[in-house]
Amino acid sequence: DQQVKQNSPSLSVQEGRISILNCDYTNSMFDYFLWYKKYPAEGPTFLISISSIKDKNEDGRFTVFLNKSAKHLSLHIVPSQPGDSAVYFCAASATASKLTFGTGTRLQVTL
Amino acid sequence: DTGVSQNPRHKITKRGQNVTFRCDPISEHNRLYWYRQTLGQGPEFLTYFQNEAQLEKSRLLSDRFSAERPKGSFSTLEIQRTEQGDSAMYLCASSARTSGYSETQYFGPGTRLLVL
């Protein structure tokens, strides 16, 4: 039972444009959501998070949007840079405990 | 560098051997998590500690896996009688448990295990 889903395995975006990565979840107990970035042979790096009481959180070029009624969140990267090329994982937790991850979306930012 | 560290970074072993991995969390973090990641999948929860107490273990964690955090600082994950299906990246993460529901976990670089 995949409680966190990232339905797009890959995404290609031109440098300078917006990258939008999507994530859906099924467990209504999730109350905290995070995005991680991962390079090959490295551990995930924390990017940005959002709690269930908010619908938007911004940090520099990164913005996460949460739509609780649709059980959907998205990560916007503006403007996209070649260094953003990596695999992005969406993760969720319920009452501050273990994380449940999606399967990841590989973002490629082209010149 | 005050991030999460893991040793070794790579381990190759023969089927049936025992292996042990170590994780050193961020020093002020009281929670420590172990995850496993296989190709094409996201990290999958294995177990976690708050200080020295092991609070939860995944049902997927077989009896061949054991984890300890004896003094509430570093942790070890041991796999006994390894099988080829144990080949994966083993990730450790730590966090500072505070009141409320938000808790950000920070990951180490992982230990890649290959069982021949």
Image: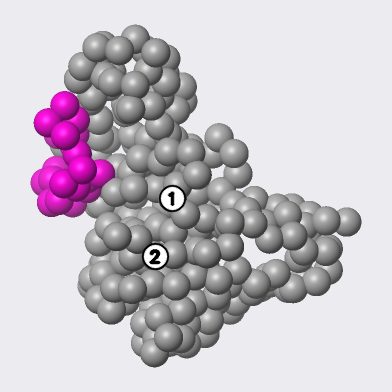
Q: Is residue A80 above or below residue A44?
A: below
* Image quadrant in which the N terminus of chain A is located: bottom left
Q: Considering depth in this image, is B85 or A67 the residue closer to the camera? A: B85
- The part of the image, by quadrant, that contains residue B87 is top left
> Where is mark 1, residue-wise?
B42
Quarter in which the C terminus of chain A is drawn: bottom right
| Residue located 58% across and 56% down the image | A9
- Chain label for disc 1: B
Residue at image position (55%, 71%) is A22
- Residue type at numbered disc 2: Val
Residue type indicated by callout 1: Gly
Q: Position of residue A106 (x, y in %)?
A: 63, 53
Q: CA distance from mark 1 to mark 2?
A: 10 Å
Range drawn in magenta? B46-70
Counting other residues with Cα less than 10 Å from the Cα at mark 2, is it few (<14), some (14-19), or many (20 or more)? many
Reply above or below: A88 against A70.
above
Tell me whether the residue at label 1 lies in contact with that at label 2, contact meaning CB atoms closer than 8 angstroms: yes
Which of these two is toward me, A42 or B14?
B14
